[in-house]
Amino acid sequence: MSSALDVLTILSVSTGAFFFLAGTVGLLRFPDALSRLHALTKADNLGLGLVVLGLLFQAEGFPVALKLVGVWLLALLAGATVTQLIAHIARMRGSTM
Amino acid sequence: MAFDIGLVTLVLGVAAWTIGARETFAAVVGFVAYGLLLALVWVRLAAPDVAMTEAALGSGLTGGLLLGASTRLARTDGPAAIEKPSAIMRLAAAVLCTLVSAGLAALVLLMLEPAPTLAPRAMANIAATGLSNPVTAVLMAYRAIDTLLETVVLLLALVGVWSLARDRVWGGLPGPYHRADPHGLLTFTAQILVPIGILIGIYIFWVGSVAPGGEFQGATVLAAMWIIASMAGLVDAPPVTRRWLRLALIAGPALFFAIGLAGFAIAGGFLAYPESHAKLLILMIEVPVTLSIATTLALLVAGPPERAPAR
């Protein structure tokens, strides 16, 4: 049973890491601020979400699992807000930053 | 091992980039990233208390202060970039930096093996404090005087910031007024985040007696929540002359000092606690200290009074 959970963890965390890698490549390669933000949010939302999902299989007890999900939700809220604020400034300046 | 080498390389890279950055704003962003990476280093060194303090105060709050400073300095960025220090100045800086680095390297290389430690004695006497987190026992019992002085230093820093106010706005409201769209995103986020953040701040403070956490980290989270709420225009700072504000600022250090003095009568020394009531007394100090630190930090970020008080 525990080895099956380990496999799920490895799969999920690896997929999460892939999204972080893809997000970073996008951040470095995309031509303008808005598409770079788009790449970054995928890493934050999906990447971190999958890492948290993977760690949930290893969590000792419900409170730890709840804290992990809480971390993800807070990162989602902060990420979405900051992205919108930066995008707003980028649009007002009308430049590619 | 590979992870640690990667981490150290990253920390050194970000540090070099931060020093090399010519633009103040970019340097501040580098500094914040550097602080977060440093927090990871502390985690790797099995020092989660230091890691939390570094992330909250060293990176987060100091980053906020520096961002404010860089905004104020934005106009001087251009002239500062053109200015080149003289050859002698640059040589002196290089020599001094090399000396400091060499000294640090020598210290690390010549360090005793095993390093001298007070940890066994700290653990042997921890039961007397009623705490089970040794770091909090050091901060609140063994070396309580250091913590008392730290709270006073924070107050002095705030007095220094306030003294920068112009005469005509003295007694006024600190910092600029933040106008935000009441139906906008920042207000929405603040309304969701601030209640959760206050809960997390109190939790971090409360859990400090048994697990990594404590009043400085908790107070920083509380101060950050106030800053977010004020940026979203939900709250405004009170005039700096308000009596209750001044009381909130000095409550922590004052009570700390009073209980420390009472130690002469009840336990035979300054800042000594009688064993039977150690935990209660420590808690009685920690609650107002957390409040005072949070208020001081929030006002430090808000800055000196800039707006005349409403008549």
Image (cartoon, coloured by chain):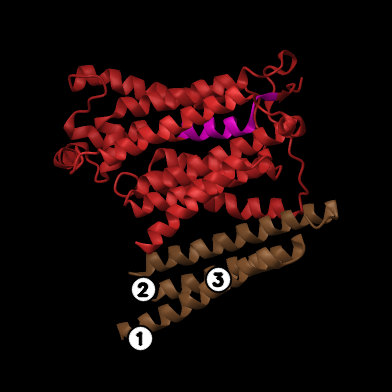
Chain colours: A brown, B red
What secondary structure is marked by label 2?
loop
- Decide whether residue B293 is among the magenta residues: yes
Spot occupied by residue B37 in the image (x, y as percentages of width and height): 48, 51
**What is the magenta range?**
B291-305
Check disc 3 and report the residue beneath it: A47
Check disc 1 and report the residue beneath it: A4
Check disc 2 and report the residue beneath it: A58
Residue located 71% across and 42% down the image: B233
Relative horizontal placement of residue B172, taking residue B103 as reference (left or right): right
> Tag 1: residue type?
Ala
Could you tell me which chain the residue with mark 1 belongs to? A
Q: Quadrant of residue B128?
A: top left
Residue A27 vs B10, above or below: the answer is: below
Prevailing secondary structure of the magenta residues: helix
Spot occupied by residue B150 in the image (x, y as percentages of width and height): 41, 27
Q: Quadrant of the C terminus of chain B?
A: top right
Please indicate, yes or no, whether residue B199 appears anywhere in the rendered image: no
Please indicate, yes or no, whether residue A82 appears anywhere in the rendered image: yes
Residue B40 vs A7, above or below: the answer is: above
Spot occupied by residue B235 in the image (x, y as percentages of width and height): 67, 39
Q: Quadrant of the N terminus of chain B?
A: bottom left
Relative horizontal placement of residue B60, taking residue A61 as reference (left or right): right
